Amino acid sequence: MSLVEVTELHRVFQMGRGAEDVTAVNRTSFSIEAGEALGLVGESGSGKSTIARILVGLERADSGEALIDGADVLRPARGRGARLARARAAQMVFQDPNGSLDRRLAVGEMLQRTLLQHGRASGRAEARSGALRLLDRVRLTERQAAARPHELSGGQRQRVAIARALAVEPKLVVLDEAVSALDVSVQAQVLDLLAEIQRDSGVSYLFVSHDLAVVQELCQRVIVLFRGSIVEQGATGRVLEAPEHPYSQLLVASTPGPDWDPERVVRDRMTFTQRMSVVPEA
Ligand SMILES: Nc1ncnc2c1ncn2[C@@H]1O[C@H](COP(=O)(O)OP(=O)(O)OP(=O)(O)O)[C@@H](O)[C@H]1O
């Protein structure tokens, strides 16, 4: 059995006032193995964040099944024990870490509280050494433990967000455009760090990104999402080198690289849009 098993996941947003409903996730099924990094790519609006948010309980599904380590994560977690168990199944790192980090707390203190709250440390002294260990793991220093989030750089803040997620010792970390706001060199450092953590701890990632180059750095496998449906999935190298579905071909062609031809991208996009407009949605 895979660590994550998603079956026929479905989510429609009712727009009201006569506007057409949006099928954000369309009977989507996929799995993630323990220790695997799975990329989820697709253009803006393809449903990536909705899937990510459903897996961590921030969004509900209309139907389908999602199991993490055998536990049904679509059912509301009632009671402290269930909420802690859910937090241990999956943690999320967002594009903007400010939402998940408490501005008022020094980051070391924040990590200590997370460790204590989730029963990962049994007292203050253990929490203190645990927080320093976590900071060290994301290559931040004791000095930075005393800083509040807004006193750190964007890359450092994202490292803190990763440390906070890891403090819970989750089975799965969902990263939603987690490196997209960082400049390229900082991005590369954070990706290296994520790869190292994955190797050392065996944690699994669902790595949501619109950036194929970034996915290639980290993910062993990739899913291509179009209008809430999976159009292609496979080993990252294979999908990026020889995409089979026209939409994946378009995504790959849209990624700047040595052979990038913007005019061709525009031409291909027009052809693809014309084709899709005559193909009814599944
Ligand atoms: N809370 C919501 N209410 C209404 N529509 C929503 C809501 N959340 C998402 N949607 C719609 O669902 C579709 C999928 O959105 P989603 O954010 O999952 O896509 P995405 O691939 O993550 O896009 P992006 O990369 O821009 O975040 C979009 O059409 C979006 O407008």
Image (cartoon, rainbow, N blue to C red):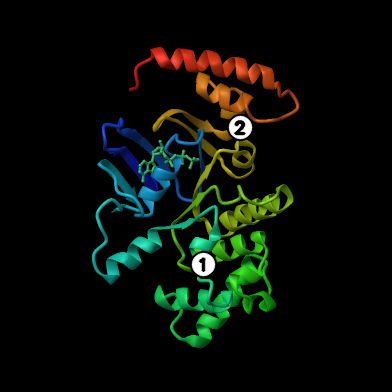
**Residue name at image x 66 percent, y 52 percent:** 182
Cα distance in 3D space between marks 2 and 1:
35 Å
The numbered dot on residue 179 is: none
> Which residue is outermost to the front?
17
Residue 37: x %, y % from top left: 52, 46
Task: Kindly state the secondary structure of the residue where label 1 is placed.
Answer: loop
Q: Which is more toward the observer, 32 or 77?
A: 77
Q: Is residue 181 above or below residue 258?
A: below
For the question of whether residue 25 can be seen, the reply is no
Mark 2 residue crowding within 10 angstroms, few (<14) / some (14–19) / many (20+): some
Q: Quadrant of residue 1?
A: top left
Report ligand 1 position as a quadrant.
top left
Q: Is residue 117 above or below residue 158?
A: below
Q: Which residue carries the number 2 mark?
A: 237
Residue type marked 1: Leu
**Residue 194 in view:** yes
Identify whether 87 is placed above or below 10.
below
Residue pictured at 60% horizontal, 76% vertical: 132
Residue 247, given in percent of the width and then of the height, sits at: 51, 23
Can you identify the residue that label 1 sits on?
A: 101
Residue at left 68%, top 18%?
A: 263
Nearer-the-camera pick, 75 or 275: 275
